[in-house]
Amino acid sequence: MTRKRLVAFIAVIQSVLFLIHFLLYQTWIFSSGGSNTPGAAWIKLLLALLSVSFVTASLLAYRYTNAALRVFYRIAAVWIGLGSFLVLAAILSWIIFGVSRLAGLGMNFHWTVELLFTAALAAGLYGVFNAGWTRITRTTVRLENLPAAWRGRRAALISDVHLGHVRNRGFLRRMVAKILKESPDTIFIAGDLYDGTAIDARRAAEPLSKLVAPHGVYFVAGNHEQFGDDSKYLNAIAAAGVRVLSNEKVEVDGLQIIGVPYRNAARDGHFASVLRALRLDRDRASVLLTHAPDHPEIAEAAGVSLQLSGHTHLGQFVPWSWMARRIYRQFVYGLSRIGKMQVFTSSGAGTWGPPLRLGSNPEIVMLEFQ
């Protein structure tokens, strides 16, 4: 993205945030009796500051990292998530108000706004709690031509940890402990280990040095590692003892394990050429590790047996979960099939932007091969 386009994108996002906060202000003030309501000026000032907080925090986070900035970023990120719920509550309040007026029904608009805003805040705060509660998701995958050695073996899949200003080395350490407790035979990390913000990449990846499995630990880069030069992230991951796969295939006891990073898999023509060059043996089972479930039809045509991805976060929370389902359809989450290939998409372990989850859970996936 060029500098001019980036400035235009930021301007659009900030304009939308201004409009959202203006809607919140007008909804509350109108329901309370108008601009002469006590404290109206303070509410306007607070919402004005909050409206620029996330863009400001994000721009700073991509260049700097320190304790004060991390606190600021977390507050701004939580607020932008809560704001999403409050906007839905405001819109619903106006819909109820309009319908009641058209129907000639009397209603207390302020009471309606208070009730819906309270429910929105409660849902948002639960979302913050839920985002920190990582589950273990278990599933069995049956693959044709699976080598006998792999029958009954288990693989751990983790994606979208997003180490940065919200999640840090301590969070990764807890994820590593949870994975090791499951004693997997192999471990797959499907990209976006980092958030792409300013971070000491090598120090953040240190807990990975304890992540071991009898048949290897494999990583493939996601879009957040590849916003720019991904070398600092990939070098840090490799230094921790994890095998970084970049357009390559390895064979472990007869199972073909392929890794295609996001940048190469996002372009359908390039993705197809990469897979052709790897010369997959269609008579033996294969596992493709790639960050996003963008082009599963290409992987299926290449003869892949199972694709493992993340990226979607299952939208994290409403209304973004609706958009994620519309974009990725059946591949947005869980185990699905296209032709002869199966796809498992994880909702991820961390969060991007608002550290909230409602309608999706952070997870570590345990796959048993049969």
Image (cartoon, rainbow, N blue to C red):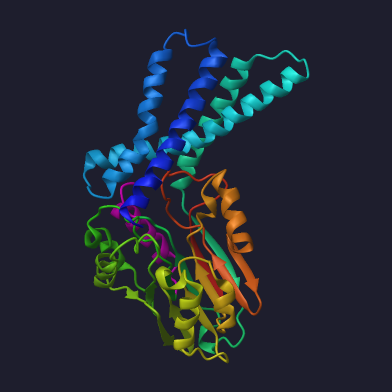
Q: Nearer the viewer, residue 6 or 59?
A: 6
Looking at this rendering, what residue extends furthest in the right direction? 103
Q: Quadrant of the C terminus?
A: bottom right
**As drawn, is 281 to the left or to the right of 100?**
left
Task: Give percent across and percent down for residue 272.
Answer: 50, 80
Q: Is residue 167 visible?
A: no
Q: Quadrant of the N terminus?
A: bottom left
**As drawn, is 119 to the left or to the right of 64?**
right
* Vertical position of residue 191 compared to residue 317: above or below: below
Q: Residue at x 25, y 40 (%)?
A: 69
Task: Give percent across and percent down for residue 5.
Answer: 37, 51
Q: Nearer the viewer, residue 32 or 363?
A: 32
Q: Residue at x 42, y 53 (%)?
A: 350
Task: Give percent across and percent down for residue 109.
Answer: 63, 16
Q: Nearer the viewer, residue 339 or 26?
A: 26
Q: Nearer the viewer, residue 98 or 247?
A: 98
Looking at this rendering, what residue extends furthest in the front direction? 4
Q: Residue at x 49, y 57 (%)?
A: 363
Q: How many marks?
A: 0
Q: Is residue 18 magenta?
A: no
Q: Residue at x 35, y 28 (%)?
A: 49
Q: Is residue 154 visible?
A: yes
Per the rendered image, the range of residues in magenta is 163-184
Task: Give percent across and percent down for residue 18.
Answer: 43, 31
**Quarter of the rendering containing residue 48:** top left
* Vertical position of residue 11 compared to residue 351: above or below: above
